[in-house]
Amino acid sequence: MTEKEIRIVTDSTADLPMGYAKDNRIAVIPLHVNFPKGDSYRDGVDLSAKDFYPMLLAAGDAIPKTSTPTKEDFLNTYSKVMNESPDCQILSIHISGGLSSTVSVAETAARELAADIYPFDSRNISFGMGLQVLEAVRMCKEGANLKKILDHLQLVSTHTETMFCLNTLEYLHKGGRIGKATAFIGSILNIKPIIHVKDGVYEAFDKVRSQRQAIQKMVDHGHSLLGGRKPLRSGVIHGACETMAEMLKTKIEETYGRVLDCFEETGAVIGVHTGPGTLGMTVCHL
């Protein structure tokens, strides 16, 4: 019996390597970025990361909000994929349900279509989700069936560490994540928090005084998780912070003995909450 073709759908927070989605026929559903004056953009479609950060700085206190794709966005995307590949199975990999309702909307759309569609909660964000897409693509090319891929992704999701060092607390404050006093004290003391994704939600990991300290902390933590092994996948993500990101890239590759799978600037949806100067890494320690 011939296995059905598997098509992959994901969303714009995956921070996939440039050109990867197009090269592998991956449908990417954008989340939305909405500025107070009424301008609305589709992440990665109408608004690139390169264009977003100058706009964010120019917005001052009038920072944008983010919103999930609509059910209609999913229905249209799934229908298009099914028209391109009749009788296919769709694996739809999305940002953690603990951080966004995107995967919940995907599930609603999938039920409505009553087709062979399997939404999957990555329990991660950025390249922590993106590397799951890369693994799914690899296994599809090797001829694996959907159950085998889903089982593997469950394992990958519990063995992936995604960490971000924020250069400023300003955007957490503006977005209502922390109080003004905390942001003010943090700025005076030059505190830069390191946040990681644990059990599908953000959790404070540590705090440092400089990005160089953050690089060492994050790389050391990844090294401890790996226990001397090379990572299955690794990546560096940054927000308008390329010089320090290059430094992190070099440190990771020297320490872990493996070339990165991804080096990208994170998009607007993540950037709204983290701001410019954000430095992040992901490592899968299977």
Image: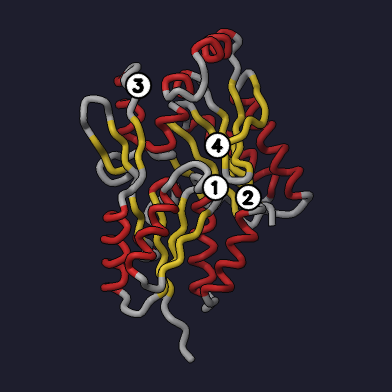
For the residues bearing labels 4 and 3, Cβ distance under 8 angstroms: no
Earlier-in-chain disc, 2 versus 1: 1
Tag 2 residue:
160
Tag 3 residue:
57
Nearer to us: label 4 or label 1: 1
Earlier-in-chain disc, 2 versus 4: 2
Q: Secondary structure at mark 3?
A: helix
**Residue 210 relative to residue 267: left or right:** right
Residue type at numbered disc 3: Leu
Tag 4 residue:
280
For the residues bearing labels 2 and 4, Cβ distance under 8 angstroms: no
- The answer to which image quadrant residue 111 occupies is bottom left
What mark, if any, has residue 124 been given in the picture?
1
Whether residue 171 is visible to the viewer of this picture, yes or no, is yes
Residue sitting at the far right:
227
Q: Label 2, label 1: how many angstroms apart (C-alpha)?
A: 8 Å
Q: Secondary structure at mark 2?
A: strand
Residue type at numbered disc 1: Asn
Q: Nearer the viewer, residue 93 or 119?
A: 119
Q: Is residue 226 above or below residue 79?
A: above
Nearer to us: label 2 or label 4: 2
Q: Residue 67 placed where, x, y %?
A: 35, 40
Nearer to us: label 2 or label 1: 1
Q: Is residue 219 above or below residue 77?
A: above
Q: Residue 60 placed where, x, y %?
A: 33, 17
Other-residue count near label 1 (Cα within 10 Å), few / some / many at <14 / 14–19 / ≥20: many
Q: Label 4, label 3: how many angstroms apart (C-alpha)?
A: 20 Å
Give the residue at x 44% y 27%.
275
Earlier-in-chain disc, 3 versus 1: 3
For the residues bearing labels 2 and 1, Cβ distance under 8 angstroms: yes
